[in-house]
Image (cartoon, helix red, strand yellow):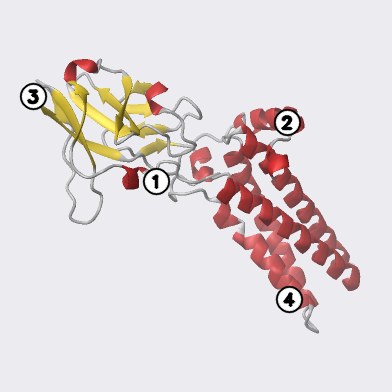
Amino acid sequence: MDRLERASALDSTVALLSSRVRALPLGSWRDVLHGRWLGHPAHPVLVEVPIGTWFSAAVLDCLPGQQRAAGILIGVGIAAAAPAALTGWVDWAEQGPRQKRVGLVHAAVNGTAVALYSGSLIVRMRGRTGLGKALGLAGLSVVGLGSALGGHLAYRQASGANHAESVSNLVGAGWHEVGAVSDFEVGQSIRRYVDQVPVVVVRESGNEVHVLADSCSHMGGPLSEGTVSDGCVRCPWHGSVFRLVDGWNVGGPATAPQPAFDTRVVDTRVEVRLRNLEPGGSAEVPAKMA
Protein backbone atom coordinates (compact mmCIF):
# COMPACT_ATOMS: atom_id res chain seq x y z
CA MET A 1 0.00 0.00 0.00
CA ASP A 2 2.82 2.40 0.83
CA ARG A 3 4.49 1.71 -2.53
CA LEU A 4 1.18 2.29 -4.27
CA GLU A 5 0.86 5.69 -2.57
CA ARG A 6 4.24 6.63 -4.04
CA ALA A 7 3.50 5.31 -7.54
CA SER A 8 3.99 8.57 -9.44
CA ALA A 9 3.72 6.66 -12.73
CA LEU A 10 -0.05 6.81 -12.22
CA ASP A 11 -0.12 10.60 -12.08
CA SER A 12 -0.72 11.25 -15.78
CA THR A 13 -3.77 8.97 -15.77
CA VAL A 14 -4.91 10.50 -12.48
CA ALA A 15 -4.67 14.03 -13.91
CA LEU A 16 -6.62 13.11 -17.04
CA LEU A 17 -9.42 11.34 -15.21
CA SER A 18 -9.63 14.01 -12.49
CA SER A 19 -10.19 16.73 -15.06
CA ARG A 20 -12.85 14.63 -16.80
CA VAL A 21 -14.74 13.96 -13.56
CA ARG A 22 -14.58 17.61 -12.51
CA ALA A 23 -15.89 18.64 -15.93
CA LEU A 24 -19.05 16.55 -15.61
CA PRO A 25 -22.10 18.89 -15.74
CA LEU A 26 -23.50 17.76 -12.41
CA GLY A 27 -24.50 21.15 -11.00
CA SER A 28 -26.05 20.93 -7.54
CA TRP A 29 -26.06 17.13 -7.83
CA ARG A 30 -22.32 17.16 -7.17
CA ASP A 31 -22.92 18.05 -3.52
CA VAL A 32 -25.61 15.36 -3.36
CA LEU A 33 -23.12 12.79 -4.62
CA HIS A 34 -20.50 13.99 -2.15
CA GLY A 35 -23.00 13.36 0.65
CA ARG A 36 -23.17 16.91 2.04
CA TRP A 37 -26.84 16.30 2.86
CA LEU A 38 -25.86 13.19 4.82
CA GLY A 39 -23.06 14.75 6.86
CA HIS A 40 -20.43 12.33 5.56
CA PRO A 41 -19.55 10.77 2.17
CA ALA A 42 -22.37 8.81 0.53
CA HIS A 43 -20.02 6.36 -1.18
CA PRO A 44 -19.44 4.04 1.84
CA VAL A 45 -23.20 3.75 2.32
CA LEU A 46 -23.91 2.86 -1.30
CA VAL A 47 -21.18 0.23 -1.60
CA GLU A 48 -22.93 -1.83 1.09
CA VAL A 49 -25.53 -2.92 -1.47
CA PRO A 50 -23.30 -4.59 -4.11
CA ILE A 51 -20.99 -6.10 -1.50
CA GLY A 52 -23.92 -7.43 0.51
CA THR A 53 -25.81 -8.88 -2.44
CA TRP A 54 -22.72 -10.50 -3.95
CA PHE A 55 -21.71 -12.07 -0.65
CA SER A 56 -25.27 -13.33 -0.18
CA ALA A 57 -25.20 -14.79 -3.69
CA ALA A 58 -22.03 -16.70 -2.80
CA VAL A 59 -23.79 -18.18 0.23
CA LEU A 60 -26.78 -19.23 -1.90
CA ASP A 61 -24.43 -20.81 -4.43
CA CYS A 62 -23.42 -23.23 -1.68
CA LEU A 63 -27.03 -24.35 -1.20
CA PRO A 64 -29.02 -26.61 -3.53
CA GLY A 65 -31.81 -25.14 -5.63
CA GLN A 66 -30.88 -21.50 -5.06
CA GLN A 67 -29.34 -20.69 -8.44
CA ARG A 68 -32.16 -18.38 -9.55
CA ALA A 69 -32.09 -16.41 -6.27
CA ALA A 70 -28.31 -16.11 -6.49
CA GLY A 71 -28.59 -14.76 -10.02
CA ILE A 72 -31.12 -12.15 -8.95
CA LEU A 73 -28.85 -10.96 -6.17
CA ILE A 74 -25.92 -10.71 -8.56
CA GLY A 75 -28.03 -8.59 -10.91
CA VAL A 76 -29.07 -6.29 -8.08
CA GLY A 77 -25.43 -5.87 -7.08
CA ILE A 78 -24.39 -4.98 -10.63
CA ALA A 79 -27.14 -2.36 -10.85
CA ALA A 80 -26.23 -0.90 -7.44
CA ALA A 81 -22.56 -0.69 -8.39
CA ALA A 82 -23.23 2.18 -10.82
CA PRO A 83 -24.36 4.86 -8.30
CA ALA A 84 -21.76 3.62 -5.81
CA ALA A 85 -19.04 4.08 -8.42
CA LEU A 86 -20.30 7.54 -9.41
CA THR A 87 -20.15 8.83 -5.84
CA GLY A 88 -16.71 7.31 -5.48
CA TRP A 89 -15.37 9.00 -8.62
CA VAL A 90 -16.77 12.40 -7.59
CA ASP A 91 -15.14 12.13 -4.15
CA TRP A 92 -11.90 10.82 -5.66
CA ALA A 93 -11.50 13.84 -7.97
CA GLU A 94 -11.23 16.12 -4.91
CA GLN A 95 -8.59 14.13 -3.02
CA GLY A 96 -4.84 14.59 -2.69
CA PRO A 97 -2.23 12.97 -4.98
CA ARG A 98 -1.50 9.98 -2.73
CA GLN A 99 -5.19 9.22 -2.19
CA LYS A 100 -5.83 9.49 -5.92
CA ARG A 101 -3.17 6.90 -6.73
CA VAL A 102 -4.66 4.37 -4.35
CA GLY A 103 -8.18 5.35 -5.38
CA LEU A 104 -7.43 4.78 -9.06
CA VAL A 105 -6.34 1.20 -8.37
CA HIS A 106 -9.32 0.77 -6.04
CA ALA A 107 -11.65 1.77 -8.89
CA ALA A 108 -9.88 -0.50 -11.37
CA VAL A 109 -10.14 -3.49 -9.03
CA ASN A 110 -13.82 -2.86 -8.39
CA GLY A 111 -14.43 -2.44 -12.11
CA THR A 112 -12.85 -5.86 -12.63
CA ALA A 113 -15.21 -7.29 -10.01
CA VAL A 114 -18.22 -5.83 -11.85
CA ALA A 115 -16.98 -7.37 -15.09
CA LEU A 116 -16.59 -10.79 -13.46
CA TYR A 117 -20.07 -10.63 -11.94
CA SER A 118 -21.54 -9.47 -15.25
CA GLY A 119 -19.93 -12.50 -16.91
CA SER A 120 -21.25 -14.70 -14.13
CA LEU A 121 -24.80 -13.44 -14.66
CA ILE A 122 -24.60 -13.92 -18.44
CA VAL A 123 -23.40 -17.52 -18.29
CA ARG A 124 -25.94 -18.35 -15.57
CA MET A 125 -28.71 -17.12 -17.86
CA ARG A 126 -27.36 -19.49 -20.51
CA GLY A 127 -27.56 -22.42 -18.14
CA ARG A 128 -23.84 -22.72 -17.36
CA THR A 129 -24.28 -22.65 -13.60
CA GLY A 130 -20.86 -24.12 -12.74
CA LEU A 131 -18.98 -21.45 -14.68
CA GLY A 132 -21.29 -18.80 -13.25
CA LYS A 133 -20.43 -19.87 -9.71
CA ALA A 134 -16.72 -19.86 -10.52
CA LEU A 135 -16.88 -16.36 -11.97
CA GLY A 136 -18.92 -15.22 -8.98
CA LEU A 137 -16.34 -16.60 -6.56
CA ALA A 138 -13.58 -14.86 -8.52
CA GLY A 139 -15.59 -11.63 -8.40
CA LEU A 140 -16.05 -11.90 -4.64
CA SER A 141 -12.29 -12.42 -4.19
CA VAL A 142 -11.59 -9.29 -6.25
CA VAL A 143 -14.21 -7.36 -4.24
CA GLY A 144 -12.28 -8.31 -1.11
CA LEU A 145 -9.13 -6.75 -2.54
CA GLY A 146 -11.08 -3.64 -3.53
CA SER A 147 -12.48 -3.39 -0.01
CA ALA A 148 -8.97 -3.60 1.44
CA LEU A 149 -7.91 -0.71 -0.78
CA GLY A 150 -11.01 1.23 0.25
CA GLY A 151 -10.22 0.60 3.90
CA HIS A 152 -6.70 1.93 3.37
CA LEU A 153 -8.14 5.06 1.77
CA ALA A 154 -10.58 5.64 4.61
CA TYR A 155 -8.54 4.70 7.68
CA ARG A 156 -4.90 5.13 6.70
CA GLN A 157 -5.25 8.07 4.33
CA ALA A 158 -8.32 9.65 6.00
CA SER A 159 -10.14 10.01 2.69
CA GLY A 160 -13.60 11.37 3.47
CA ALA A 161 -12.81 11.90 7.15
CA ASN A 162 -13.60 15.14 8.98
CA HIS A 163 -10.21 16.84 9.21
CA ALA A 164 -11.49 19.41 11.72
CA GLU A 165 -12.97 16.96 14.21
CA SER A 166 -10.00 17.11 16.60
CA VAL A 167 -10.44 20.84 17.28
CA SER A 168 -12.93 20.28 20.09
CA ASN A 169 -10.38 18.05 21.86
CA LEU A 170 -7.46 20.46 21.46
CA VAL A 171 -8.93 23.84 22.40
CA GLY A 172 -9.24 24.48 26.11
CA ALA A 173 -12.39 25.80 27.74
CA GLY A 174 -12.96 29.50 28.30
CA TRP A 175 -11.98 32.63 26.44
CA HIS A 176 -8.75 33.09 24.48
CA GLU A 177 -7.30 36.32 23.10
CA VAL A 178 -6.45 36.35 19.39
CA GLY A 179 -5.36 39.96 18.92
CA ALA A 180 -6.39 43.58 18.87
CA VAL A 181 -9.38 44.81 16.89
CA SER A 182 -7.06 46.86 14.70
CA ASP A 183 -5.16 43.69 13.70
CA PHE A 184 -8.04 42.51 11.52
CA GLU A 185 -8.70 44.29 8.25
CA VAL A 186 -12.32 44.25 7.10
CA GLY A 187 -13.08 41.47 4.64
CA GLN A 188 -9.75 39.70 5.05
CA SER A 189 -9.23 36.18 6.36
CA ILE A 190 -6.41 36.14 8.91
CA ARG A 191 -4.86 33.19 10.72
CA ARG A 192 -4.42 33.19 14.45
CA TYR A 193 -3.85 30.41 17.00
CA VAL A 194 -5.91 29.26 19.96
CA ASP A 195 -4.04 26.75 22.13
CA GLN A 196 -1.77 26.18 19.10
CA VAL A 197 -4.82 25.33 16.98
CA PRO A 198 -5.02 27.52 13.85
CA VAL A 199 -8.20 29.55 13.42
CA VAL A 200 -9.33 31.95 10.71
CA VAL A 201 -10.55 35.37 11.87
CA VAL A 202 -12.72 37.52 9.60
CA ARG A 203 -13.92 41.03 10.43
CA GLU A 204 -16.90 42.02 8.30
CA SER A 205 -18.01 45.47 7.16
CA GLY A 206 -20.71 45.59 9.82
CA ASN A 207 -17.95 45.43 12.44
CA GLU A 208 -18.68 41.80 13.26
CA VAL A 209 -15.91 39.30 13.99
CA HIS A 210 -16.27 35.66 12.99
CA VAL A 211 -13.86 32.88 13.88
CA LEU A 212 -13.74 29.34 12.53
CA ALA A 213 -11.23 26.51 12.72
CA ASP A 214 -8.72 27.19 9.96
CA SER A 215 -8.13 23.62 8.72
CA CYS A 216 -10.88 22.71 6.24
CA SER A 217 -12.92 19.71 7.31
CA HIS A 218 -12.58 18.22 3.83
CA MET A 219 -8.82 17.86 3.43
CA GLY A 220 -7.30 20.28 5.92
CA GLY A 221 -6.85 23.20 3.51
CA PRO A 222 -6.03 26.61 5.09
CA LEU A 223 -9.21 28.69 5.07
CA SER A 224 -7.14 31.74 6.04
CA GLU A 225 -5.71 31.61 2.51
CA GLY A 226 -9.16 31.41 0.96
CA THR A 227 -11.55 34.08 -0.29
CA VAL A 228 -14.30 35.80 1.70
CA SER A 229 -17.58 36.66 -0.01
CA ASP A 230 -21.28 36.96 0.92
CA GLY A 231 -20.68 36.00 4.52
CA CYS A 232 -18.75 32.85 3.62
CA VAL A 233 -15.17 31.70 3.24
CA ARG A 234 -14.07 29.43 0.39
CA CYS A 235 -11.29 26.89 0.86
CA PRO A 236 -8.42 27.50 -1.60
CA TRP A 237 -7.74 23.79 -2.13
CA HIS A 238 -11.00 22.24 -3.32
CA GLY A 239 -13.54 25.06 -3.11
CA SER A 240 -15.61 24.04 -0.08
CA VAL A 241 -17.66 27.00 1.18
CA PHE A 242 -18.39 27.64 4.88
CA ARG A 243 -20.75 30.17 6.43
CA LEU A 244 -18.80 32.49 8.70
CA VAL A 245 -21.51 32.97 11.30
CA ASP A 246 -21.71 29.29 12.27
CA GLY A 247 -19.26 27.28 10.11
CA TRP A 248 -22.02 25.51 8.19
CA ASN A 249 -20.80 23.91 4.96
CA VAL A 250 -22.99 25.52 2.32
CA GLY A 251 -20.99 24.02 -0.55
CA GLY A 252 -18.97 20.84 -0.99
CA PRO A 253 -16.94 18.77 -1.35
CA ALA A 254 -16.79 19.16 2.45
CA THR A 255 -19.52 17.12 4.11
CA ALA A 256 -18.91 18.38 7.67
CA PRO A 257 -19.18 21.96 9.00
CA GLN A 258 -16.29 23.89 10.52
CA PRO A 259 -15.97 24.25 14.29
CA ALA A 260 -17.08 27.79 15.11
CA PHE A 261 -16.11 30.13 17.95
CA ASP A 262 -18.05 32.68 19.97
CA THR A 263 -16.40 36.12 19.93
CA ARG A 264 -16.31 39.20 22.12
CA VAL A 265 -14.27 42.38 22.47
CA VAL A 266 -12.71 43.29 25.81
CA ASP A 267 -10.73 46.56 25.97
CA THR A 268 -10.20 46.55 22.18
CA ARG A 269 -8.92 42.96 22.31
CA VAL A 270 -10.76 40.17 20.47
CA GLU A 271 -11.42 37.07 22.53
CA VAL A 272 -12.83 33.76 21.30
CA ARG A 273 -14.35 30.66 22.83
CA LEU A 274 -15.09 27.36 21.14
CA ARG A 275 -18.83 27.27 20.60
CA ASN A 276 -20.66 24.80 22.81
CA LEU A 277 -22.92 22.64 20.65
CA GLU A 278 -23.95 20.28 23.45
CA PRO A 279 -27.58 20.33 24.63
CA GLY A 280 -28.06 23.28 26.94
CA GLY A 281 -24.92 24.98 25.66
CA SER A 282 -24.92 28.64 24.72
CA ALA A 283 -23.80 30.27 21.53
CA GLU A 284 -23.13 33.99 21.54
CA VAL A 285 -23.63 36.27 18.59
CA PRO A 286 -20.49 37.50 16.80
CA ALA A 287 -18.78 40.41 18.50
CA LYS A 288 -19.60 43.90 17.31
CA MET A 289 -16.83 46.45 17.60
CA ALA A 290 -17.28 50.10 18.32
Q: Is residue 166 left or right of residue 25?
A: left
Q: Position of residue 239 (x, y in %)?
A: 47, 29
Q: Amino acid at mark 3?
A: Asp
Q: Which residue is mark 4?
A: 59
Residue at 33% in and 21% down: 189
Give residue 8's mark.
2
Residue at 39% in and 46% down: 165
Residue at 53% in and 38% down: 30
Up the image or down, 256 lies above or below 47; here it is: above
Q: Amino acid at mark 1?
A: Glu
Nearest to the observer: residue 56 or residue 128 = 56
Q: Amino acid at mark 4?
A: Val
Categorize mark 1 by other alpha carbons within 10 Å: few (<14), some (14-19), many (20+).
Answer: some
Give residue 165's mark.
1
Give residue 267's mark.
3
Q: Earlier in the sequence, mark 4 or mark 3?
A: 4
Up the image or down, 152 lies above or below 227; here it is: below
Residue 104 seen in the current view: no
